[in-house]
């Protein structure tokens, strides 16, 4: 790809824009939202890059994930910077800037239109929905996987113009590296087929091929024709990529099930999941146009979604999909941009529910690129007919990018520390138990015990009444030294499931920590009435009675 002066200047400005918005994170802290599990309290990562650590990265499903390259990147950070959070943040910013530049180069390579490509990359660089992916250290996996997503697109664009086995192997290699960072890239083979249709135009009517190497659909320029290939040929070409995608799906499901991250069908039945998925597709678009009141966690509504929201969302999706399909031949960018959005969100839309969130801003990091392309190409097709409109459009683009950059700058500040992050989430969302819980834990660590207990108690009232989760919250609180709240959590776990043996043992341990030995003995005896032959409970009871248990 030829890099002229304008292309170089636009690329430099895009990188500068990323730095201006996000370099403030150099002064930010780690947050108690996966940063503790992924980095601070993870001995394999804290040690830095070691042979043992690399082996662990490829073998582990820790934190319900299998993303070895992401673990290795955190190890490298710890080798270079220790636990200096500002440096870890700076690496995120550098990767996001690289992603922005790569996206720009991919679009220029496919279209040869640097100004349109720069606007799309600019929207990607500064949209507030992308703040979470950049300002959250634990979302390194999002940034790294996107880096290899765009590298794969760049390699693929080179391959379709100059086809040989080595270029194809490069496509496969970059794709594998992306999957080793985050499995969300499983949809990439389908996106390559979309790009074969437009802009690469490998699927065209033979009569159109004779019209020249530079084609247009209406008034909209597209990339040069790359040589037609049969549908069967295109699918066969993607078979190795689909195999890699399927393998990644299998490994991911195994990792998430073993880590308990996949929520059961009893808690969120398939009807609830479909309804939430339909609404989430529309909500992401609304947030794209109106990026206010964003939060790091949006509680899942369960069966509480209003029927009218589901019906209207389904109707909107149906209308937009029908419009994209019916206009695909005349205006292909609409179909490609829309199906890019739909397809890339499928792995995280909640049909397989992982975690308790209804949606997450970070999930839009790659999907919104499709929508940005559609919007920019649609507006460009209108304004390029008249010079005066071009000037107006350029001015509006400047203000839009400037406004989005200002909003992202402000949104990024909420990620300064855990108290700021979860105070914001609790403010802009309703009944957000996780926000109150993490806020309470952060306040306890900051020494504000009274406020901490208030928020933790409120969180336990709002969080799902599942014994396993109450037990997990109790263990976390006990580890942090919030013993009285840990006792409350274990008691609720037992009320949710009176046969849950671990909750009895943990509650007894909490009473021991609180110096209430008789209460601990009473709980263990109660546990034996439910599970009379439980060896661990019997042994723990003997230790407390004999006084051999350190408090």
Image (tube, rainbow, N blue to C red):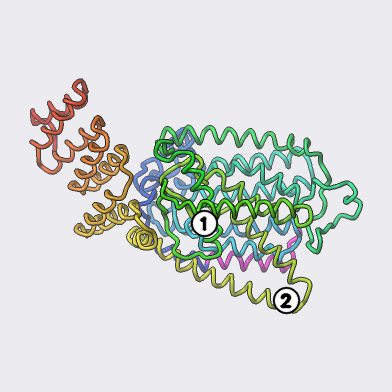
Residue 535 picture quarter: top left
Judge the density around disc 2: few (<14), some (14-19), many (≥20) Cα neighbours within 10 Å.
some
- Residue 163: image x %, image y %? 79, 42
Residue range in magenta is 1-19
Q: Residue at x 26, y 34 (%)?
A: 497
Q: Residue at x 88, y 50 (%)?
A: 209
Q: Is residue 10 magenta?
A: yes
| 1 or 2: mark nearer the eye | 1
**What secondary structure predominates along the stretch shown in magenta?**
helix
Position of residue 435 in the picture relative to residue 337 (left or right): left
Q: Is the N terminus in the top left, top right, bottom left or bottom right quadrant? A: bottom right
Q: Under tag 2, what secondary structure?
A: helix
- Residue 27: image x %, image y %? 40, 64
Looking at this rendering, what residue extends furthest in the bottom direction? 388
Judge the density around disc 1: few (<14), some (14-19), many (≥20) Cα neighbours within 10 Å.
some
Residue toward you, 3 or 135: 135
Q: Which residue bears the numbered disc 2? A: 389
Residue toward you, 57 or 413: 413
Tally of numbered tags: 2
In the drawing, what numbered circle is on residue 283? 1
């Amino acid at each position: 790809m030829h890099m002229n002066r304008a292309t170089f200047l636009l690329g430099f400005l895009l990188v500068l824009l990323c730095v201006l918005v996000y370099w403030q994170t150099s002064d930010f802290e780690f947050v108690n939202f996966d940063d503790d599990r992924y980095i601070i309290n993870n001995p394999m990562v804290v040690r830095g890059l070691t042979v043992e650590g690399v082996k662990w990265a490829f073998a582990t499903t820790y934190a319900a994930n299998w993303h070895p390259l992401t673990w290795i990147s955190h190890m490298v950070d710890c080798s270079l910077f220790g636990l200096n959070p500002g440096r870890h943040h700076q690496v995120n910013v550098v990767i996001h800037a690289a992603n922005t530049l790569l996206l720009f180069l991919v679009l220029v390579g496919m279209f040869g239109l640097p100004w349109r490509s720069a606007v799309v990359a600019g929207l990607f660089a500064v949209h507030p929905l992308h703040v979470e992916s950049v300002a959250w250290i634990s979302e390194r996996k999002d940034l790294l996987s996107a880096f290899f997503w765009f590298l794969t697109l760049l390699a693929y664009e080179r391959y379709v113009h100059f086809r040989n086995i080595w270029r194809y192997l490069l496509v496969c290699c970059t794709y594998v590296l992306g999957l080793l960072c985050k499995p969300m890239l499983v949809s990439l083979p389908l996106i390559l087929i979309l790009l074969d249709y437009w802009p690469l135009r490998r699927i065209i009517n033979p009569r159109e091929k004779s019209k020249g190497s530079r084609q247009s659909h209406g008034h909209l320029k597209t990339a040069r024709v790359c040589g037609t290939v049969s549908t069967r040929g295109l699918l066969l070409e993607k078979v190795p990529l689909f195999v890699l995608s399927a393998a990644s799906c299998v490994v991911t499901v195994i990792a998430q099930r073993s880590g308990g991250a996949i929520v059961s069908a009893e808690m969120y039945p398939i009807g609830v999941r479909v309804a939430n998925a339909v609404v989430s597709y529309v909500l992401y678009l609304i947030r794209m146009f109106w990026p206010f009141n964003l939060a790091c966690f949006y509680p899942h509504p369960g069966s509480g979604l209003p029927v009218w929201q589901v019906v209207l969302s389904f109707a909107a999706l149906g209308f937009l999909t029908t419009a994209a399909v019916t206009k695909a031949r005349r205006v292909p960018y609409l179909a490609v941009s829309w199906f890019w959005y739909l397809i890339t969100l499928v792995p995280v839309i909640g049909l397989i529910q992982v975690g308790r969130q209804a949606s997450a801003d970070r999930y839009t990091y790659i999907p919104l690129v499709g929508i940005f392309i559609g919007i920019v190409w649609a507006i460009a097709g209108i304004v390029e007919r008249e010079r005066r409109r071009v000037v107006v459009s350029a001015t509006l683009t400047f203000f839009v990018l400037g406004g989005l950059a200002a909003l992202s700058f402000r949104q990024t500040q909420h990620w300064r520390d855990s108290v700021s992050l979860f105070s914001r989430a609790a403010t802009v969302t309703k009944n957000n138990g996780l926000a109150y819980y993490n806020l309470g834990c952060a306040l306890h660590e900051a020494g504000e015990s009274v406020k901490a207990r208030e928020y933790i108690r409120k969180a336990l009232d709002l969080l799902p009444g599942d014994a396993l989760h109450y037990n997990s919250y109790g263990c976390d609180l006990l580890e942090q030294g919030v013993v009285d709240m840990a006792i409350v959590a274990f008691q609720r776990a037992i009320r949710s499931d009176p046969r849950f043996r671990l909750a009895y043992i943990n509650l007894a341990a909490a009473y021991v920590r609180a110096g209430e030995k008789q209460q601990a003995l009473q709980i263990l005896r109660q546990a034996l009435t439910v599970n009379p032959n439980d060896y661990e409970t019997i042994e723990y009871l003997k230790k407390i009675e004999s006084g051999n248990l350190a408090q």
